[in-house]
Structure formats: structure tokens, C-alpha cells
Image: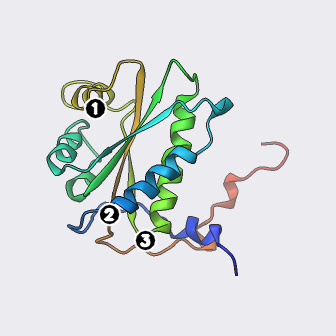
């Protein structure tokens, strides 16, 4: 039996509580490869990744948004997904694909992940994008899409089943 992508998709759940275990360099490189191999519009390769594995810096990233950052409290690693706005007018879409690939690869490796949106979100002081940009010295031409918090799962969530599908959201040929 070959690789079961459908099973992987159903198993992947947002994990916000991680064990106090650092990711190995091999695990990090596998996640980075997944993001970099993700397709981009016109193959422009406008998506870039910032791997953050310093705990103090991860906690500072948490403060770049005023809500919904619990996953960064215990994550031993985070990957910030950014896009070069000069290379691509669809950097958001390209970044979303890269982030999704990273999350699926994390699940495939037995790791947990959660997407923490930064684009169009705010901190107590400024936009979340600007906060992350300042903290990580990201040039202005880059948009900051999200942070993927990553680590070894410290919570268990049941996989989705066919019964979880909302088939009323699917339309054929017309709305």
C-alpha cells in the first residue's frame, strides 16, 4: 500500500500545546524543504521562510498579535512565512500554499503545528505584520503572512472522519 494523502489530511489538526523538546536539525530541514518545494505562481519563488528556534524570540513573536497566539507559548520552533511583494502580486496565495505544505509535512513527521495569522491582524501597538517585520529585521518589500508554530504534540486530537464533511458547501457546475 502506498502513501495515503487523504489519511494525512484528516489527521492534521491544529495543535497549540507542545512538549519541551527541541526539533532536530533534520526535522527542521524537512519542514523547510516542504515550504520551499511548494508551487508558486509562474514559479517566481517569491516565498521565503524564517526559522525561529530561540525560545525568547518565539515568545516575542507571540506579542506581535494581541490574540490567538497560544501555540507560540510552548512551541520550540516557529517558521515565519513571508512573501516578496516585488516578485509576486499573489504572494499571499503562494505563502498559503507553502504554509500548508509545511503543516502537512509536520503531520507526516509526527509533529504538531498551528497556523497563526499575521497579515491583517493587530497587536496592541501596530499591525502584526509591522511588529514581526521590526522584530525580525524583515525588509519592507516583504509581506508577513503567518507564523507556523511547530513541535512535538503535547495534546491529542482525534482525526477528522467522513462524517465531519459539510457537503452542503460543495456546488457542481453552478452555485
**Which image quarter holds the C terminus?**
top right
- Residue 15 placement (x, y as % from top left): 36, 62
Q: Residue furthest right?
A: 173
Do callouts 2 and 1 mark residues in contact (Cβ within 8 Å)? Answer: no
Chain-order first, disc 2 or disc 1: 2
Q: Disc 2 and disc 1: Cα gap in Å? A: 25 Å
Colouring used for the render: rainbow
Question: Which quadrant would the N terminus be assigned to in this image?
Answer: bottom right
Residue sitting at 32 percent across and 63 percent down? 24
The earlier-in-sequence mark between 2 and 3 is: 2
Determine whether the residue tagged by mark 2 lies in a helix, strand or loop. Answer: loop
> Which residue position is annotated with label 1?
132
Residue at mark 3: 110
Direction left: furthest residue: 56
**From what the image shows, is residue 99 above or below residue 47?**
below
102 left or right of 122?
A: right
* Left-right relation of 93 to 125: right
- Residue at which label 2 appears: 24
- Residue at x-position 57% and y-position 23%: 88
Quadrant assignment, res 3: bottom right
Image position, residue 164 (x, y; %) = 58, 68
Cα separation, mark 3 vs mark 1, equals 28 Å
Tell me where residue 36 appears, x and y as whole percent: 52, 44
Residue 146 spot, x, y in % from top left: 39, 40
Q: Are marks 2 and 3 in contact (CB under 8 Å)?
A: no
Between the C-alphas of marks 2 and 3, the distance is 13 Å
Q: Mark 2 or mark 1: which is in front?
A: 2
**Residue 74 quadrant:** bottom left
Q: State yes or no: discs 3 and 1 in contact (Cβ < 8 Å).
A: no
Residue drawn at x 50%, y 34% is 47
Q: Nearer the viewer, mark 2 or mark 3?
A: 2
Q: Name the N-terminal-most of marks 3 and 1.
A: 3
Amino acid at each position: 500500500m502506498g502513501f495515503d494523502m487523504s489519511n494525512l489530511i484528516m489527521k492534521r489538526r491544529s495543535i497549540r500545546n507542545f512538549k519541551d523538546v527541541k526539533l532536530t536539525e533534520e526535522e527542521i530541514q524537512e519542514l523547510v524543504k516542504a515550504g520551499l518545494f511548494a508551487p508558486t505562481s509562474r514559479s517566481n519563488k517569491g516565498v521565503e521562510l524564517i526559522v525561529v528556534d530561540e525560545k525568547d524570540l518565539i515568545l516575542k513573536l507571540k506579542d506581535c498579535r494581541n490574540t490567538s497566539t497560544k501555540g507560540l507559548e510552548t512551541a520550540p520552533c516557529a517558521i515565519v512565512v513571508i512573501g516578496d511583494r516585488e516578485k509576486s502580486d499573489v504572494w499571499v496565495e503562494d505563502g498559503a500554499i507553502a504554509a500548508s505544505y509545511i503543516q502537512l509535512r509536520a503531520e507526516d513527521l509526527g509533529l504538531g503545528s498551528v497556523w497563526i495569522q499575521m497579515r491583517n491582524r493587530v497587536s496592541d501597538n501596530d499591525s502584526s505584520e509591522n511588529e514581526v517585520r521590526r522584530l525580525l529585521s524583515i525588509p519592507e518589500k516583504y509581506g508577513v503572512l503567518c507564523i507556523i508554530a511547530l513541535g512535538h504534540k503535547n495534546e491529542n486530537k482525534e482525526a477528522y472522519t467522513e462524517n465531519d464533511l459539510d457537503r452542503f458547501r460543495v456546488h457542481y457546475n453552478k452555485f
